[in-house]
Amino acid sequence: MDVTKSNFQTVLEALDDELKNASFVSIDTEFTGLSSTEGRNSKLSSLDTPPERYKKVLNGTSQFVIIQFGLSIFRFDNSISKYVNKTYNFYIFPNTSTLPGLCDTKFLSQASSLGFLASQGFDFNKLIKEGIPYLNLVDEEKLKVILEKKSKLLHLRSDASSTQVSELPADQKGFLNNITSKVETFLQNEENEEKSNAALELHCSTIQNELIFSHVKYRYPKLLFEISKKTSSGCTVIVKKTGIQNSKTEPSGTDNNVSEMEKFEDNVGFSRVIRKITDSGKLVVGHNMLLDLCHILGQFCAPLPEDYHDFKGMVNTFFPRFIDTKVMATTKPFRDILQNSALERLLSSLLAAPFRSIEIVPATGFPSYTDNFKNHEAGYDAFITGRCFLAMANYLEDISSSQSKTTAVHESSFITPFYQKIFMMMVPDIPYMTISGPDLEPSREHVFHVTFPSEWKLQDIFHLFSVHGTVRVDWTGDTSAFVTLHRKENSPFVLRAMAESKLPVGCSVISYKHYLDRKSQNATLSAEVPDLSSRKRLSSAVECNSCDFPSPKKIRKDVKNVKLNKEQFVVSADWD
């Protein structure tokens, strides 16, 4: 179901009960762009640590925005032993009206991203005209403070006016009550509603004229009060309508404030959906969730923190229970039987043996996505994410030795190890961020940081490490790179061999640990490393077979014939 401004309030009101009865929810998003790759520091590396990866993603998150959000709600129906599904496809666009105290929203877009969405049938006219606005908690608080100050000012004015009226001489209070009654009657006269030239004449003394303008006029801002005739004994005040009135009486300051608060709630908009998901405490399932979570938190909750550990705390606050199906698909037991973990291909694999599909039925009034493919619509992708989760959870139950197997697989204890982990692309030894605890800290004794002359080519680095087996090269600059040995057992001999031989002028080799220590001691090291833009380098890792290079030295005889364990080193930059 598509959700825009026109039906958002109706959907929002029903969401509390739907989330209360949900077994779990799955989500997906579409962005105006994916990542900012300007500069060497933004490029993903197979040696990124979780804090480094977060920092790189953070740089691009603030530049792009979510324009479509898919929410798929799954409820296990015990009476039929099937999951019932409701899927919403929200169109989201920044507020196009001017809000007091808030800047007009600016964001970037990537031509390739928008072109791709257009090729999938994305309706950009619907997005801009009917997209649901939003405010994060910071902007919401700013606007709320401004409206509260305005409300207090209106009350102060009202109180001041009441005080002035109460201080009037007793003989004038009756006069003002009479004048007010006449003005009210004038407004309520149905015959005058359609007469633009209708007027009311009020005859009064000079003092009473001042009282009309100071105590009556302010109550009726859409009426025109004019002095028509002046005489020595008094004057005549003419009251006219400035236009057809929308109501019998002019809204009071309180009514205006209520209206503004309603508009305020409208401007908070889609952010309320995220808060309802958080408050529900339900399991949230996503696929390759790092970008999704960063954008959701930054756009609808609060600005993302600079510190990675603060980010972990923020994720746990808003999403206390989530599972990334990308983590499931790329760890045991699934990584041994799934060839690709991209969402569409993953679903295709999970619909075949040895997996057993779980039947999902759409709720009344909701479309069925089972046979209706809408790839890269956020709602559809959220649905198939949930479907993949159920298939993998079901498989875990099937292969378990437990005697009591559950049909409602979202309650399975076998999915617990996958909680609070976010997939990290391209990093084989740290495949995920651990949000609820310490991250993995693998040994990188087989990784070395190398500096060399600017004229060096890839082949020069291969030659330098030729006696140590096949290597992987990750460029970090024009004159530096990380070199990873495929044969970890050769690691202890590298620095010794480099020390025994004379390295070329301008070349140095240090351990990965030494590099990290030096980096922490010298914060300016990154500024001293030249940028990649002046020279074309391979953006992904490069591997070379060193079978044509000389054999290892005598000091490494004991490991010369050790076979390479490929599973330890397999890396695919295209594995999305």
Image: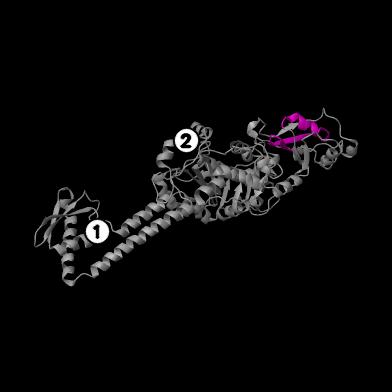
Q: Is residue 248 above or below residue 354?
A: below
* Magenta-drawn segment: 454-483
Horizontal side of 146 relative to 321 (left or right) equals left
Above/below status of 452 relative to 297: above
Q: Amino acid at mark 1?
A: Tyr
Q: Residues within 10 Å of mark 2 (few under 14, many from 20)?
A: some
Q: Which residue is mark 2?
A: 122
Whichever of callouts 2 and 1 sits on the residue coming sooner in the sequence is 2
Quarter of the figure with residue 553:
top right
Task: Work out which quarter of the rendered image holds the C terminus and state it.
Answer: top right
Q: Viewer-nearest of labels 2 and 1?
A: 1
Frontmost residue, 242 versus 434: 242
Of 361 and 314, the residue lying toward us? 314
Residue 152 found in image quarter: bottom left
Residue extending farthest to the left is 232
Residue 129: mark = none
Left/right placement of residue 564 relative to residue 194 reads right
**Amino acid on which the number 2 mark rests in the picture:** Phe
Q: Check residue 476 for magenta coloring.
A: yes
* Alpha carbons under labels 2 and 1: distance apart: 51 Å
Q: Position of residue 162 (x, y in %)?
A: 27, 66
Q: What secondary structure is marked by label 2?
A: loop
In the rendering, at what x and y percent does residue 113 appear? 53, 35
Task: Identify the residue position indicated by label 1 in the image.
Answer: 218
Q: Secondary structure at mark 1?
A: helix
Pointer 2 and pointer 1: residues touching (CB < 8 Å)?
A: no
Residue 335 inside the magenta-drawn segment: no
Task: Identify the residue at horizontal 36%, vertical 54% (top origin).
Answer: 260
Neighbours of disc 1 within 10 Å: few (<14), some (14-19), many (20+) = few
Q: Residue 220: in sight, yes or no? A: yes
Residue at 72%, 44% (x, y): give it.
429
In the current view of this chain or complex, which residue is farthest to the bottom? 170
